[in-house]
Amino acid sequence: MSKLTYKASYYALYAMFAIILIVMVLFFLGGSATGDSAIPGIDPEMWQPAQTDALLYLMYVLFGVAIATTIVAAIFQFGAALKDNPTNAVRSLLGLILLVVILFIAWAIGDGTPMYIRGYDGADNVPFWLKITDMFLYSIYILLFVTVVAIIVSGIRKKIS
């Protein structure tokens, strides 16, 4: 890794740590929500932090940065591999295709039946979001199963050879 890339990632890491630390301190020490930011109908004994929105927005931003970084890194890695060995580069797309297939299968088996949630009349209890939630849960289960099987198989293969 070049020295410039190392320095940039080093400073970016510590800048993100500082931002996360600031938002966490604001969340825990920022007081209780009042006015419009307080959720009506909640037991007054329950604490509602004033800076919950800041914490949620930080998580959205970090999630977006992680996805964008992953996509950009995969594109650069594919481009570099395409120059060196085109066959292996195209074969490396097999993992991405497999992930898309798993997501499609998980979407297909997801249930879109609206749920009865007492006290909730929001707009998110619709088939689309319910199927998305099921898709993510099922894909996590499938990928966790595949990971455990791969660990076991690689351990057995290592012992045999």
Image (cartoon, grey):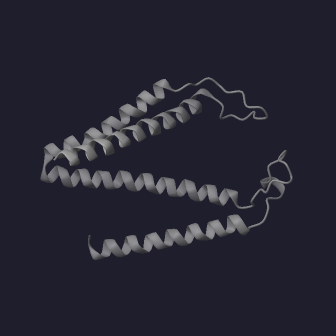
- Count of all numbered marks drawn on residues in the image: 0
User: Along the horizontal axis of the image, is 153 left or right of 51?
Assistant: left
Q: Position of residue 87 (x, y in %)?
A: 14, 43
The extreme front residue here reads: 159
Position above or below: 57 against 99:
below
Residue at x 36%, y 31% (from the top left corner)? 101
State the residue at coordinates (46%, 37%). Answer: 141
Residue at 73%, 69% (x, y): give it: 29
Query: Vertical placement of 17 versus 153: above or below?
Result: below
Q: Nearer the viewer, residue 161 or 145?
A: 161
Res. 144 image quadrant = top left
Q: Position of residue 45 (x, y in %)?
A: 85, 54
Instruction: Residue 156 in the image: state x and y as whole percent.
Output: 25, 43
Residue in the image at 72% along x and 35% along y: 122
Q: Is residue 140 left or right of residue 155?
A: right
Task: Determine whether, in the image, residue 36 is placed left or right of residue 70.
Answer: right
Q: Is residue 72 left or right of residue 19?
A: left
Judge whether 28 appears above or below 35 on screen: below
Q: Quadrant of residue 7?
A: bottom left
Q: Is residue 107 above or below residue 16?
A: above
Residue 1 placement: quadrant: bottom left
- Image coordinates of residue 91 in percent, x first then y, are 20, 41
